[in-house]
Image (tube, rainbow, N blue to C red):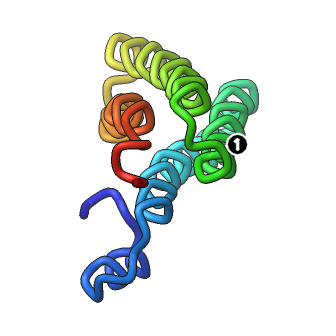
Amino acid sequence: KEDMNHDDYLALKRGKLTVIRGMQSMITEVGAGVYSYMVMLANLERKQEAGFFGDIRERVFSIRSKIGEDTTQEGLDQLSNEMMGIYRDLNTAHIYLQAHKPEEACILHSVTNTACGLVYNIKNFSKEVV
């Protein structure tokens, strides 16, 4: 429940949240977290770093837009692999921040964890769609 927006949470409580919409909501949570950090970096004039996270955000929303299109295991494996790449980029950034800017590392901590969980959730998504 903590990985979805308010409208989706209400739909879940009412029994009207589809499995695909629930997955999209979790993916959106990753994109929103990355966006928040990206805006902070842009406001601090750290444009190159902001661009790096902007690229990650675009990749996240690309996965979100494709999640319901191809629910074959091959298609889901591809999206899961794409999310793994995003997780690795976020985790690398998180590790770097822990060493060099620990006050910023906490911003990416939960986003990185959510991306990691999505690798598994996307890969096993076809079991939920049926």
On screen, residue 127 versus residue 7, left or right, reads left
Estimate the x, y position of residue 106 in percent, counting from the top left. Answer: 31, 36
Q: Is residue 109 above or below residue 97?
A: below
Image quarter in which the N terminus is found: bottom left
Residue 119 position by quadrant: top left
On screen, residue 43 versus residue 24, left or right, reads right
Estimate the x, y position of residue 82 in percent, counting from the top left. Answer: 59, 24
Residue drawn at 32 percent across, 34 percent down: 117
Q: Is residue 81 above or below residue 99?
A: below
Residue drawn at 25 percent across, 83 percent down: 13
Counting every numbered tag in the picture gives 1
Disc 1 designates what residue?
62
Relative depth, front residue between 4 and 122: 122
Check disc 1 and give the amino acid type. Ser
Estimate the x, y position of residue 87 in percent, counting from the top left. Answer: 46, 24
On screen, residue 41 versus residue 96, left or right, reads right
